[in-house]
Image (cartoon, grey):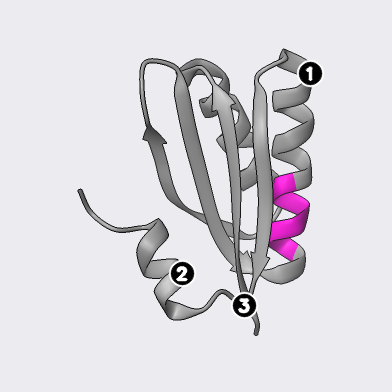
Amino acid sequence: MNKALGMIETWGLAISIEVADAMLKSANVSLLIQEKKDIALVTIIVEGGVSAVQLAVDAGTRVAQHAGALISFCVIPNPYISTRKFLIRKE
């Protein structure tokens, strides 16, 4: 199975929890990170099969857009190992 990473950035912790919930309910993905970057910016990263990650990001993006909290999103199919390590590094 080809792995992928999916990321969504939102304004606000509460909406990020709702976005993560929608992502996890919509497809067979695993939550890797839900991290506050500053007072309001939250990054959510999931991992799974390419099609599952795309479905999860689509679902999460709809929730964030509806709330007016979407900043950005992307899907990285088959990320290079260094890319994955960079994204999920421990501070």
Q: Earlier in the sequence, mark 1 or mark 3?
A: 1
Q: How many numbered marks have been drawn onto this rendered protein structure?
A: 3
Give the residue at mark 1.
66
Q: Which label belongs to residue 84?
A: none
Where residue 2 sits in the image (x, y, percent)? 65, 82
What residue lies at 47% left-to-right and 24% top-to-bottom?
41
Where residue 69 sits in the image (x, y, percent)? 65, 19
Foreground: disc 1 or disc 3: 3
Question: Is 66 left, or right, of 76 in this rendering?
Answer: right
Amino acid type of the residue that numbered disc 3 sits on in the rendered structure: Asn
Q: Which stretch did the figure color magenta?
A: 52-57
**Residue in the foreground of this view, choosing between 48 and 75:** 75
What residue lies at 57% left-to-right and 20% top-to-bottom?
15
Question: Is 69 left, or right, of 54 in this rendering?
Answer: left
Residue 10 is covered by the magenta coloring? no
Give the residue at mark 3.
78
Where residue 10 sits in the image (x, y, percent)? 58, 27
What residue lies at 51% left-to-right and 27% top-to-bottom?
17
Amino acid type of the residue that numbered disc 1 sits on in the rendered structure: His
Query: Disc 1 and disc 2: Cα gap in Å?
Result: 30 Å
Structural crowding at the residue carrying mark 1, measured as other residues with C-alpha within 10 Å and reported as few (<14), some (14–19) or many (≥20) = few
> Helix, strand or loop at disc 1?
helix
Give the residue at mark 2.
83
What residue lies at 56% left-to-right and 37% top-to-bottom?
20
Foreground: disc 2 or disc 3: 2
Look at the picture and state if 68 lies above or below 9: above
Amino acid type of the residue that numbered disc 2 sits on in the rendered structure: Thr
Query: Disc 1 and disc 3: Cα gap in Å?
Result: 29 Å
Residue 55 is covered by the magenta coloring? yes
